Image (cartoon, coloured by chain):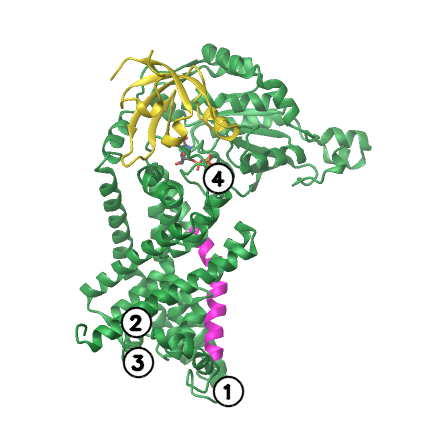
Chain colours: A green, B yellow
């Protein structure tokens, strides 16, 4: 009986539970966010929806909770997501299932709707992407389909908000009248059970029994209600693919597109970031400093130099993050990211990875955390672990920020650009080396079958919503870390009370001194050591930390202060180390939670530290040698 | 008699009918869900260079499949050369 099984999730009394079920990439997330108004993450990457998103919904007075299930191909399938959905259906009483299929692929996707039918769950069938179906010449007789299947069938376009009102009506009708709450309160146990649908204890036997008749049922339904075009009609996709997947033009075009994308992001983002930074700085100097002048110096220092500075560091970051996710969203939604997986697969296969790992590493250039979460699309654990091992080497936007600052402080613009480019190359090299070294330990023979969706035009609204959601997300998780980190650096620098800030007598000075035997040979002095220490928490606080350590808030002045303290080879060594060692505490946290292995997490941290030290050592000592020989300035 | 044609041997633009799948259940199910079932017509659109994946079209779906995995799909009939 159901009381033996603890429900995965259940709604409060009187609230209907509606599950959204469909194949990957059919527009479930889009539908979900259009219907509930919440900004669910959307992407053109099969299987990205992994957490169970849920949201409240009011269906003409009837309260309901909508749950977005992971995209699955087959209710009997073997993947993790398919198991999640089965477990969910077996443990949760569901009032209605909204099945979403891609209308233009109804020829194969109808199977999932038939499986839901076999389970006897109350359902509504939505044929999404009606716009594409029409464009490709697929015509569907929804009335016929509806009467054959015995459930409402509606053609919709979630992305363009077409048909959503009818969907609501159909959902209300299928749910039937709400259980009267007063009757429910006084009702006996029997009628209580009536109001709450019971979950199906075991899906597999039912599905297995129905398996044999599925192909014929499907063929009959398709013959009766669907007309497919004799010829593929998506000429746009045809033509674009001929160019973008061209055997030898494809890859150069891809790299060109990536280079332009990064260029555009930083050409627009960095000035914005600097403007925002100076604005905040001016506000601090012009408004806050006079305002707080009456406070004791310690408190004033804490509020201004630690707290305000920390907040400023996070805030100045937001424009670049917004732009980055905007660009990433356009790539994903247009369908080009799957093509990137196709283009890179031959190379990645040789590294023991696949095209998806490449795409995820690429996402890691924005932020490693979502990229590591994205490895859930892989089934083989070896492949997942190997991908998680290489993703942290992707030069994320937080690290880039440090590099842009250091490059500007130590090099003229042209050389600075080259240094940044070199760091990107180093980032790739570290990932490739790591994959080659460890592919034997984390072997995978997972087959790779990916859908290449037709090219789509992302809508501005969708992209802005998405980028905005990512920025909010960043703000939430990062600000705690960053403020904490900056405050901690400040404390380490000012304690014990009375010492000169960040001097050798302060806590941080002593800590830096302590680590000198290890870090001296790679050119990292005690001050830089403290910056690295806090970079372990998050790279976002490295600059804020340096500002406190050197007692300079203004970026230009800070740059000069650092440049007089350390040599350019020390600076490059610092950058190399920053690039390669642990990206941030959050990355470590998600590696731990995703791999579910402490040993692997520790290994990943140690390996990156070792590699960082070795590379910095080789660079610093090598450059020193060349300088002594007079080859290098 | 020639040996049965294989997916990876098709010329881009050529299509064929699928005979059987010699894949384990996981891969088999995934292929079937994406439309690669016995009796279906499959068209090779292009092959990526350097031994890379194949770009296929089955019914209304386009997908990429590695050559290694494609070797487990047996074809029965070729439908006209390109
Ligand atoms: N043309 C068209 N595209 C749509 C429509 N609905 C969604 N899309 C696009 O389809 C792609 C996939 O949409 P998602 O909402 O991410 O699909 P999903 O089913 O949640 O996919 P997973 O997250 O992989 O499970 C996105 O690029 C959407 O913009 C539609 O009605 N018409």
Q: Which residue is mark 1?
A: A497
Secondary structure category for the residue under label 4: helix
Secondary structure category for the residue under label 1: loop
Q: Which residue is mark 3?
A: A565
Could you tell me how far apart the alpha carbons at marks 1 and 3 are, in whole angstroms?
A: 25 Å
Could you tell me how far apart the alpha carbons at marks 1 and 2 are, in whole angstroms?
A: 36 Å
N-terminal-most mark, 3 or 2: 3
The subunit carrying tag 4 is A
Q: Is residue A606 left or right of residue B15?
A: right
N-terminal-most mark, 1 or 3: 1
Could you tell me how far apart the alpha carbons at marks 4 and 1 are, in whole angstroms?
A: 53 Å
**In the image, residue A51 lies at what x, y percent?**
54, 43
Q: Nearer the viewer, mark 1 or mark 3?
A: 3
Instruction: Tell me the magenta residue range.
Output: A470-492
Could you tell me how far apart the alpha carbons at marks 2 and 4 are, in whole angstroms?
A: 52 Å
**In the image, residue B17 lies at what x, y percent?**
38, 15
Can you name the residue that lies furthest to the front here? B1
Of the 4 image quadrants, the one containing the N terminus of chain A is top right
Q: Nearer the viewer, mark 3 or mark 2?
A: 2
Q: Nearer the viewer, mark 3 or mark 4?
A: 3
Check if residue A169 falls in the magenta segment: no
Q: Which residue is mark 4?
A: A33
Circles 3 and 4 on the same subunit: yes
The residue shown at (56%, 28%) is: A75
Q: Which residue is mark 2?
A: A620
* Mark 4 Cβ inside 8 Å of ligand 1: yes
């Amino acid at each position: 009986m159901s009381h033996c099984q603890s429900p995965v999730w259940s709604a409060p009394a009187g609230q209907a539970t509606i599950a959204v079920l469909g194949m990957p990439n059919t527009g479930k997330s889009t539908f979900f966010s259009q219907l509930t108004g919440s900004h669910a993450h959307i992407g053109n990457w099969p299987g990205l929806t992994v957490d169970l998103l849920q949201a409240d919904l009011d269906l003409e007075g009837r309260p309901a909770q909508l749950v977005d299930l992971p995209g699955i191909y087959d209710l009997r399938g073997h993947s993790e997501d398919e198991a999640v959905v089965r477990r969910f259906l077996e443990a949760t009483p569901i009032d209605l299932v909204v099945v979403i299929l891609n209308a233009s692929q109804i020829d194969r996707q109808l199977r999932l709707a038939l499986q839901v039918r076999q389970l006897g769950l109350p359902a509504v069938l939505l044929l999404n992407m009606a716009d594409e179906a029409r464009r490709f010449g697929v015509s569907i007789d929804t009335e016929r389909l509806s009467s054959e299947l015995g459930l409402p069938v509606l053609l919709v376009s979630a992305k363009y908000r077409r048909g959503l009102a009818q969907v609501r009506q159909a959902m209300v009708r299928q749910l039937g009248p709400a259980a009267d709450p007063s009757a429910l309160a006084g009702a006996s146990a029997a009628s209580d059970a009536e109001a709450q649908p019971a979950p199906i204890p075991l899906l597999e036997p039912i599905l297995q029994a129905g398996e044999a008749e599925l192909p014929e049922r499907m063929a009959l339904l398709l013959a009766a209600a669907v007309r497919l075009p004799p010829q593929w009609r998506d000429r746009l996709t045809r033509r674009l693919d001929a160019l973008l997947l061209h055997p030898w033009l494809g890859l150069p075009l891809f790299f060109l597109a990536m280079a332009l994308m990064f260029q555009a992001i930083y050409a627009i983002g960095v000035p914005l970031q600097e403007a925002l930074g100076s604005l905040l700085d001016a506000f601090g100097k012009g408004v806050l400093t006079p305002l707080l002048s009456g406070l004791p110096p310690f408190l004033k220092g804490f509020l201004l130099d630690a707290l305000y500075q920390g907040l400023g560091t996070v805030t100045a970051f937001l424009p670049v993050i917004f732009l980055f996710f905007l660009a990433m969203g356009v790539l994903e939604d247009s369908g080009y990211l799957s093509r990137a997986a196709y283009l890179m697969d031959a190379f990645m296969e040789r590294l023991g990875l696949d095209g998806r790992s490449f795409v995820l590493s690429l996402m890691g250039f924005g932020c490693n955390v979502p990229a590591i979460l994205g490895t859930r699309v892989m089934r083989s654990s070896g492949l997942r672990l190997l991908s998680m091992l290489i993703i942290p080497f992707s030069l994320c936007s937080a690290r880039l920020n440090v590099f842009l600052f250091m490059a500007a402080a130590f090099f003229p613009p042209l050389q600075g650009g080259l240094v940044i480019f070199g760091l990107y190359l180093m980032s790739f090299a570290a990932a490739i080396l790591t994959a080659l070294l460890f592919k034997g330990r984390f072997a995978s023979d997972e087959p790779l079958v990916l859908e290449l969706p037709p090219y789509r035009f992302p809508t501005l609204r969708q992209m802005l919503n998405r980028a905005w959601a990512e920025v909010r997300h960043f703000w939430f998780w990062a600000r705690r870390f960053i403020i904490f980190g900056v405050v901690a650096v400040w404390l380490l620098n000012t304690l014990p009370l009375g010492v000169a800030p960040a001097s050798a007598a302060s806590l941080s000075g002593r800590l830096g001194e302590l680590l000198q035997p290890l870090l001296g040979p790679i050119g990292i002095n005690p001050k830089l050591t403290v910056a690295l220490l806090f970079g372990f928490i998050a790279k976002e606080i490295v600059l804020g930390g340096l500002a406190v350590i050197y007692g300079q808030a203004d970026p230009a002045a800070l740059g000069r202060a650092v440049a007089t303290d350390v040599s350019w080879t020390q600076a490059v060594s610092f950058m190399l180390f920053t690039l390669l060692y642990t990206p941030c505490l959050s990355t470590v946290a998600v590696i731990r939670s995703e791999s579910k292995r402490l040993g692997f997490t520790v290994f990943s941290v140690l390996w990156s530290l070792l590699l960082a030290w070795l590379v910095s050592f080789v660079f610093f000592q090598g450059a020193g040698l060349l300088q002594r020989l007079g080859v290098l300035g | 008699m020639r040996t049965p044609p294989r997916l990876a041997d098709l010329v881009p633009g050529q299509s064929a009918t699928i005979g059987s799948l010699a894949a384990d259940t996981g891969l088999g199910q995934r292929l079937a869900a994406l439309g690669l079932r016995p009796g279906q017509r499959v068209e090779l659109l292009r092959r990526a260079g350097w031994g890379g994946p194949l770009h296929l079209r089955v019914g209304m779906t386009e997908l990429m499949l590695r050559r290694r995995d494609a070797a487990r799909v047996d074809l029965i009939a070729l439908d006209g050369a390109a």
